[in-house]
Image (cartoon, grey):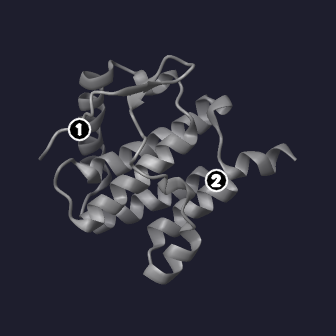
C-alpha cells in the first residue's frame, strides 16, 4: 500500500503541531453532510454530521464501527492498521506531533477527504486507515485539548 503523501509544505499551529498544507484540497468539514448522507444513504456520513453538531464522540465511534464492518476489519485489525498510520506520521512529523494540539475541524476535514477518496477507489494513499486515524485523533483532541474544539457543537455548548 502507498505511504502518506507529502506536499513538502507544512502548516504550523500555535501549539507547535504541524500538518501538510490544506490549501486547494477543499473543506470537506463544511459540506452539508446531513443532506449528502440522506441522498447517498451513507450512515457513516450521518454519524459524522451528528458529531459535528452534537459533539458526542460516540457518533465518531459508530462511524468507525460501520467503516470497519464495511472494510471487513475487527477491532484488532483496525488498531494494527491505524498503528501503521501513527508510525508513518511519526516519520513525517515526529513522534506525538498530533498530541500537541490541532484544531478539531482539521481532523474532521481530513477524515472526510480520506473517506471520499477511499469510496472513490483511490489507491495513492492508505485512505482507509487515514480515515480511522483522523476520527480517533478527533475524539482524543476533544477529550484532552478542549481549546482545540472549533466545531459547531462547541458554540452550542458555550451558550
Relative horizontal placement of residue 106, taking residue 79 as reference (left or right): right
What number of labels is visible?
2
**Dot label at residue 56:** 2
Residue count near mark 2 (Cα–Cα under 10 Å), binned few <14, some 14–19, many ≥20: some
Label 2–label 1 contact, CB within 8 A: no
Q: Residue furthest left?
A: 1
SS for callout 2:
loop
The residue shown at (71%, 51%) is: 153
The residue shown at (27%, 60%) is: 118
The residue shown at (60%, 56%) is: 51
**Dot placed on the residue nearer the N-terminal end, 2 or 1:** 1
**Dot label at residue 4:** 1
Q: Foreground: 148 or 10?
A: 10
Distance from the alpha carbon under mark 2 to that under mark 1: 29 Å
Percent across and percent down for residue 103 are 57, 35
Residue count near mark 1 (Cα–Cα under 10 Å), binned few <14, some 14–19, many ≥20: some
Say which of marks 2 and 1 sits in front: 1
Relative horizontal placement of residue 94, taking residue 41 as reference (left or right): left
Determine whether 32 is above or below 113 in the image. Answer: below
Q: Residue furthest front?
A: 24
Percent across and percent down for residue 31 are 54, 62
Q: Foreground: 113 or 72?
A: 113
**Dot label at residue 40:** none
Percent across and percent down for residue 155 are 77, 47
Q: Residue furthest right?
A: 159
Percent across and percent down for residue 133 are 37, 43
SS for callout 1:
loop
Amino acid at each position: 500500500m502507498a505511504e502518506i503523501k507529502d506536499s513538502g509544505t507544512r502548516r504550523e499551529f500555535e501549539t507547535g503541531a504541524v500538518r501538510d498544507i490544506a490549501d486547494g484540497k477543499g473543506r470537506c468539514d463544511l459540506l452539508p453532510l446531513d443532506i449528502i448522507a440522506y441522498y447517498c444513504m451513507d450512515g457513516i456520513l450521518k454519524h459524522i454530521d451528528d458529531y459535528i453538531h452534537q459533539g458526542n464522540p460516540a457518533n465518531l465511534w459508530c462511524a468507525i464501527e460501520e467503516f470497519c464492518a464495511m472494510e471487513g476489519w475487527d477491532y484488532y485489525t483496525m488498531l494494527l492498521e491505524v498503528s501503521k498510520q501513527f508510525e508513518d506520521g511519526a516519520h513525517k512529523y515526529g513522534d506525538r506531533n498530533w498530541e500537541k494540539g490541532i484544531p478539531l475541524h482539521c481532523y474532521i476535514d481530513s477524515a472526510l477527504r480520506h473517506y471520499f477518496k477511499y469510496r472513490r477507489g483511490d489507491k495513492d494513499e492508505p485512505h482507509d486507515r487515514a480515515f480511522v486515524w483522523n476520527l480517533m485523533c478527533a475524539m482524543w483532541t476533544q477529550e484532552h485539548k478542549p481549546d482545540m474544539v472549533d466545531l459547531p457543537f462547541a458554540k452550542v455548548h458555550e451558550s
